[in-house]
Each structure stands twice: as structure tokens, then as C-alpha cells.
Amino acid sequence: MANLSRPQPARQILAREPAPRVIVSRRKLIAGAAIALALAGLAWIDGGEEPLHPIAQEVAVPGAAQ
């Protein structure tokens, strides 16, 4: 079967042409920002920390250290 795609131009390794720009639509940018803010809000509310709990066990100490 014949290759019907357009031939790609040969590129040199040290070519001075700019890299192709990635175009992100405004809608995707806003959706990504909203998701990031939602995750940051959940992390802020949760906090990720627990209060300190007192140790309720006795620790064996050698006789000289008493």
C-alpha cells in the first residue's frame, strides 16, 4: 500500500528553526487551573496533620540513669 502522508522535511540537528509551539485552548487552561485550585483547597482543608498524642507507656530506664 502506498504511503499517502505528506513527506516530512529533512531536519538538521543544528537547525535554527524554532520549536513548534504547543497551543492550549483557553477552556483547557481554565479547567486545569480549576482542578489545581480544587486539589490545593482539599489539601488546605485536610491539613494532613494530626494532633500530638501523649505517650501512655512507661519506658524502661537503666538503673544508673534514674
Image (cartoon, rainbow, N blue to C red):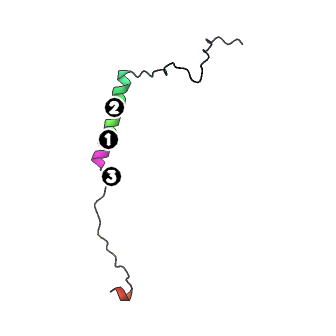
Q: Which mark, by number, is residue 48?
A: 3
Q: Which residues are magenta?
A: 40-47
Callout 3: SS: loop
Q: Examine the rendered structure and indicate whether residue 49 appears above or below residue 35.
A: below
Residue type beneath disc 3: Gly
Q: Nearer the viewer, residue 26 or 35?
A: 26
Residue at 29% in and 66% down? 53
Residue type beneath disc 2: Ala
Residue at 33% in and 52% down? 48
List the residue tagged with mark 1. 40
Callout 2: SS: helix
Tags 1 and 3 touching, CB below 8 Å: no
Q: State which quarter of the image contains the C terminus.
A: bottom left
- Residue 23 part of the magenta segment: no
Q: CA distance from mark 1 to mark 2?
A: 10 Å
Residue type beneath disc 1: Ala
List the residue tagged with mark 2. 33
Res. 8 image quadrant: top right
